[in-house]
Amino acid sequence: MSTLVLVVVTLAVAGAITYILMKKGTIADANNNNIPDAIEEKIEEAKVVVKNVKAKVEKAKEVVAEVKKVADKVTKPATKKATTKTTKK
């Protein structure tokens, strides 16, 4: 229980310090929405990365579907029959 309290208190202190520094102007917040501009920029960068990854995943799905079509057309190769060796006594 004390670990949970410690984490909550730490987050509250960090949030309060960030809020105070934004109001003093030390941390930039151009649109006054109480979210630092640095965090907003990182979120926008993450959105771009997610969009690119989604596009790559869609391309990969198309490639896998094409490979599956080709694999379905290929027949199974003939299997080699097992040979039994007899031992001489």
Image: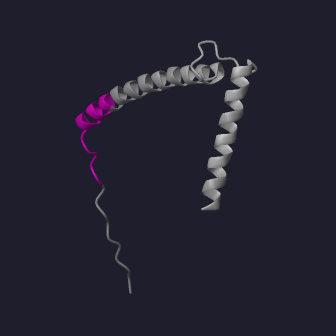
Q: Quarter holding the N terminus?
A: bottom right
For residue 77, above or below residue 81: above
Q: Position of residue 21 (x, y in %)?
A: 73, 25
Q: Quadrant of residue 81?
A: bottom left
Looking at the image, residue 36 sits to the left or right of residue 79; the answer is right
Question: Looking at the image, which residue is at 65% across and 17% down?
Answer: 29
Furthest residue toward bottom = 89
Q: Can you give x and y, in whole percent of width and height, for residue 22 in the image?
A: 69, 22
Please state the horizontal and vertical placement of residue 88, each as a whole percent of the image: 38, 82
The chief SS type of the magenta part is helix
Q: Residue furthest top?
A: 30
- Is 77 a magenta residue? yes
Coloring applied to the structure = one colour
Residue 78 to residue 17: above or below = below
| Quadrant of the snapshot with the C terminus | bottom left
Give the residues drawn in magenta, as a range: 65-79
Between 50 and 24, the one lying in front of the other is: 24
Residue at 29%, 36% in the rendered image:
71
Q: Quadrant of residue 61?
A: top left
Q: Is residue 88 magenta?
A: no
Q: Is residue 41 above or below residue 85?
A: above
Q: Residue at the spot x=56%, y=19% of the render?
A: 33
Tally of marks:
0
**Residue 63, x across and y down, in percent:** 36, 27
